[in-house]
Image (cartoon, grey):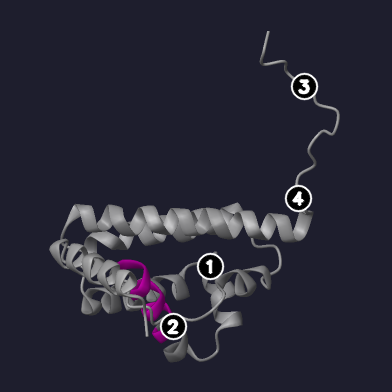
Amino acid sequence: MAHPDTIAAREDKAVQAAALGITEQRISDLVEAFYARIRSDDMLGPIFNEKITDWPPHLARMKAFWTSIAIESGRFRGNPMVKHMAIPDIDQTHFTRWLMLFDHILPEIMPDPAACRFFSERAARIADSLLTGISIHRDGLPSIPQNREKHDVAR
């Protein structure tokens, strides 16, 4: 069973989401409409269509993911980093396109501009995190100079 503070935080987040008009149905509509666009996109469609052969389970996972992000349902279980690292040659241009399509569809589904900002900001943070993880996985950690000058704070 979840800790009482966790339960309270989830309830608070759900109340905040509801105030912005974020519901499970709207999240479902967002995921359905967004991935319909992704599938037909010239850049991203071929990548997604190659990796995903059975769309209903993927859409269900994405609905659980975004519901967990927005309403704190706690339903999502998975590791998006591993899935994204398995895509050869994925880079900033792909994430930029994904975010552009996502931001374009948000106002069609979410009634409140604050709800659009909520989703857009989280999507951008997630993209940044995935890109960082992919970069570290592919290129290793950036090197940090070993012989940095020490500054005497007591001067």
Q: Can I make out residue 54 in this image?
A: yes
Q: As drawn, is 118 to the left or to the right of 80?
A: left
Q: Can I make out residue 91 in this image?
A: no
Disc with the residue nearer the chain's start (3 vs 1): 1
Q: Nearer the viewer, mark 3 or mark 2?
A: 3
Figure quadrant of residue 152: top right
Residue type highlighted by circle 1? Leu
Disc with the residue nearer the chain's start (4 vs 1): 1
Which residue in the protein does label 3 denote?
150
> Residue 59: within the magenta?
no
Please tell me how crowded label 2 is: few (under 14), some (14-19), or many (20+) other residues with Cα within 10 Å. Answer: some
**Decide: marks 4, 1 in contact (CB < 8 A)?**
no
Disc with the residue nearer the chain's start (3 vs 2): 2
Residue 6 numbered tag: none
**Decide: marks 3, 2 in contact (CB < 8 A)?**
no
Residue type highlighted by circle 2? Arg
Residue drawn at x 55%, y 76% as measured from the top left:
48
> Residue 67: within the magenta?
yes
Considering the image in quadrants, where does the C terminus appear? top right
Q: Nearer the viewer, mark 4 or mark 1?
A: 4
The picture places residue 134, in percent across and down from the top left corner, at: 67, 60
Which residue in the protein does label 2 denote?
61
Q: CA distance from mark 4 to mark 1?
A: 28 Å
Q: CA distance from mark 3 to mark 2?
A: 49 Å
The picture places residue 26, in percent across and down from the top left corner, at: 23, 74
Residue 141 numbered tag: 4
Local SS, label 4: loop
Q: Main secondary structure of the magenta part?
A: helix
| Residues rendered magenta in the picture | 60-70
Q: Nearer the viewer, mark 4 or mark 3?
A: 3
Residue type highlighted by circle 3? Lys
Local SS, label 2: helix
